[in-house]
C-alpha cells in the first residue's frame, strides 16, 4: 500500500476504486483537458478504463500510482491528483491534474515536490521523468521549478490522440538534491 502525505495545504492519499467520480468531475472541464486531449472531456467509459489502468499499475508497483488530493483546510474539497508511477519500461513519471479553481496557487508544485521527495528519499529512485505538450508553458515552468531538465521533443503514442510530440523532462537523484540544496524540501 502506498503512503498518504500531508503538505502545508494538501492531503494526498492513494487512489481507490471508488474515486472514479472524482476523476469524471475533473475530466469534465474542457479547460483542464486542453493540454491532455486537446480539450475533449472524458466519457464515463474513458473513466472506467482509466480506473482499471490506475488500479493495475498500483497492484503491480506497490508504493507507486495515483494520489487523490484534498484541501487540508476543507477536507471534503477535492483538488485534483498527482502521480508517481512507472511506465511499462519501469521509468517513473511524475504528473498532476488539478481542478481549475485551484490553479495559480502553487499547488501543482507543492504536491509534486512531496511525491518527488518520497520518490528520491524513501524509494531511492535514481531518476524521474515527465512529459508535457510542447506548448504547455505553465507545466514546463512547474517541472523546471521542481528540478527537472528539458531533454528533447519526441514522438509519443497518446491513448486518444495517436502519435503526437511531447517535451520530455528528466531529473536524477543528484540533480534533485542539487536543485533543493538551498531550498529545504517543502513537506
Ligand atoms: C498545469 C497545472 C497543473 C498548473 O497548476 P498550478 O497549481 O496552477 O501550478 P503552480 O501554481 O504550482 O505553478 C504555475 C507556475 O506557472 C506560472 N504561470 C502561470 N500562468 C503562466 C503563463 N501563462 N505563462 C508562464 N507562466 C505561467 C505561475 O506563475 C507559476 O510559477 P511561479 O510558481 O514561479 O509563480 C494546472 O493548470 C492543471 O491542472 N491543468 C490541467 C491539467 C494539466 O494540464 N496537467 C499537466 C499536464 S502535463
Image (cartoon, helix red, strand yellow):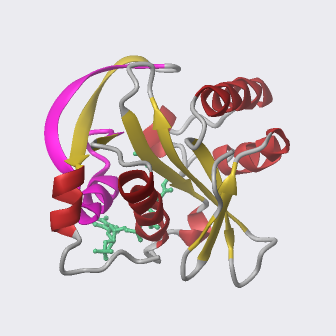
Residue at 52 percent across and 46 percent down: it is: 83
Question: Quick check: 187 above or below 59?
Answer: below
Q: Residue at x 38, y 58 (%)?
A: 121
Q: Residue furthest right?
A: 18
Q: Position of residue 43 (x, y in %)?
A: 73, 30
Magenta stretch, residue numbers:
131-158
Q: Nearer the viewer, residue 22 or 113?
A: 113
Residue at (67, 34) in percent of width and height: 42
Image coordinates of residue 27 in percent, x first then y, are 65, 44
Q: Residue at x 71, y 84 (%)?
A: 73
Residue 80 in view here: yes
Does the stretch in magenta take in 143? yes
Is residue 38 in sight in this rendering?
A: no
- Quarter of the rendering occupied by the N terminus: top right
Q: Which quarter of the rendered image does ligand 1 occupy?
A: bottom left
- 104, above or below 125, in the image: below
- The total number of labels drawn is 0
Amino acid at each position: 500500500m502506498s503512503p498518504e502525505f500531508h503538505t502545508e495545504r494538501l492531503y494526498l492519499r492513494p487512489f481507490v476504486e471508488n474515486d472514479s467520480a472524482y476523476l469524471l468531475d475533473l475530466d469534465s472541464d474542457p479547460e483542464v483537458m486542453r493540454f491532455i486531449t486537446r480539450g475533449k472531456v472524458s466519457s464515463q467509459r474513458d473513466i472506467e478504463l482509466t480506473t482499471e489502468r490506475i488500479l493495475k499499475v498500483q497492484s503491480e508497483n506497490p508504493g507507486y500510482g495515483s494520489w487523490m488530493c484534498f484541501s487540508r483546510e476543507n477536507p471534503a474539497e477535492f483538488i485534483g491528483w498527482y502521480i508517481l508511477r512507472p511506465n511499462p519500461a519501469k521509468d517513473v513519471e511524475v504528473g498532476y491534474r488539478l481542478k481549475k479553481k485551484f490553479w495559480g496557487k502553487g499547488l501543482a508544485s507543492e504536491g509534486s515536490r512531496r511525491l518527488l521527495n518520497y520518490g528520491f528519499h524513501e524509494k531511492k529512485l535514481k531518476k524521474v521523468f515527465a512529459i508535457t505538450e510542447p506548448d504547455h508553458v505553465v507545466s514546463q515552468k512547474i517541472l523546471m521549478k521542481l528540478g527537472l531538465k528539458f531533454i528533447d521533443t519526441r514522438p509519443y503514442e497518446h491513448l486518444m490522440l495517436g502519435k503526437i510530440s511531447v517535451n520530455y523532462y528528466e531529473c536524477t537523484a543528484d540533480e534533485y538534491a542539487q536543485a533543493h540544496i538551498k531550498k529545504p524540501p517543502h513537506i
